[in-house]
Image: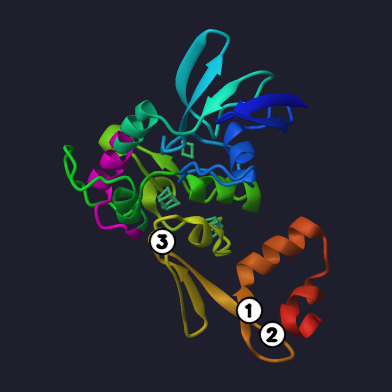
Amino acid sequence: MVTITIDGKKIEAKEGEMLLPVALDNGFDIPHLCYHEALSPYGACRLCLVEVKKGNRTKLTTSCNYPVMEGIEVITDSENIRRARKMVVELLLARSPNVPIIKKLAEKYGVTSTRFKIENEDCILCGLCERVCREIVGVSAITFMGRGDKREVGPPFKIEPEVCIGCGACVYICPTDCIKLEEKNDERTIVRWNRTLRMRRCKICGEKFAPWFQLEYFSKLTNIPKDFFEVCPNCRK
Ligand code: SF4
Ligand code: SF4
Ligand code: FES
């Protein structure tokens, strides 16, 4: 364990733990868009900026990928931080002016206009979808492609990702709500990735409950016999 100070309050934390979750767990309010506790930090949105003082040096840094170490002093709100954060919000507002979570952030930080070129994108390139698919689901159906203003997230070669199991984890985690899941007739579609999968119906109640492909994937992954996956979670109880 190490002892650090956040806004003057002494806090114990595990050495190497990232600063953002330590601060959030201790009730400090630091905005963040690309961080999730179950995933590795990525440092993409730059909203979680704080000031860290180590010895005689103070620097402005993202807190989601800053490992805590003995004796650091952290400031979560200062003129400097507010100025930098406003700039980040301005950039986000230029990229995604119609995304509700970005509009809310702009309102909170008093950003009413942006000096940057308006792009009107619904994706803020936070990378949460790519990480959840790779790190938790384990299939890497989507990836980052391109550079600069051509950078985007999607299935490789922009064709239907055959490894996608249609689990919806990316839909759930996307902060801008731009990945939609639709179910029609006996099919589920992850609209943004153009992935359509046939749904399985429960052998007992007849309700659709998951894509066939997903159930086959879990059966292989867990070595649980296939007949376990013929019944929906409700009827399994
Ligand atoms: S729905 Fe497809 S792309 Fe999204 S997390 Fe699941 S497997 Fe990955
Ligand atoms: S699609 Fe959503 S989760 Fe994926 S990078 Fe874009 S904003 Fe983030
Ligand atoms: S939450 Fe730290 S950079 Fe996005």
Which residue shows up at 63% across the image and 87% down it?
Answer: 207
Marks 2 and 1, the one that precedes in the sequence: 2
In which quadrant is the C terminus drawn? bottom right
Which residue shows up at 67% across the image and 21% down it?
Answer: 69
Q: In the rendered view, does 63 fall on the left or right side of 112?
A: right
Along the line of sight, the residue nearer the viewer: 150 or 176: 176
Q: CA distance from mark 3 to mark 1?
A: 22 Å
Expressed as whole percent of the image width and height from the top left, the position of residue 25 reads 64, 44
- Against 57, residue 221 (above or below) is below
Q: In the rendered view, does 121 fall on the left or right side of 196?
A: left
Identify the residue under disc 3: 177
Whether pointer 2 and pointer 1 mark residues with C-beta atoms closer than 8 Å, the reply is yes
Magenta region, residue range: 87-100
Q: Is ligand 2 closer than 8 angstroms to the Cβ of mark 3?
A: yes
Identify the residue under disc 2: 202
Q: Residues within 10 Å of mark 1 (few under 14, many from 20)?
A: some
Which residue shows up at 41% across the image and 39% down it?
Answer: 45
Q: Nearest to the eye among marks 2 and 3: give it.
A: 3
Query: In which quadrant of the rendered view does residue 151 lie?
Result: top left
Q: Which mark is residue 107?
A: none
Along the line of sight, the residue nearer the viewer: 223 or 30: 30
In which quadrant is the N terminus drawn? top right
Question: Callout 3, which amino acid?
Answer: Asp
Expressed as whole percent of the image width and height from the top left, the position of residue 99 reads 31, 57
Identify the residue under disc 1: 209
Residue 126 magenta-highlighted: no
Along the line of sight, the residue nearer the viewer: 117 or 101: 101
Question: Callout 2, which amino acid?
Answer: Cys
Would you say the magenta stretch is mainly helix, strand or loop?
helix
Q: Residues within 10 Å of mark 3 (few under 14, many from 20)?
A: some
Along the line of sight, the residue nearer the viewer: 11 or 150: 11
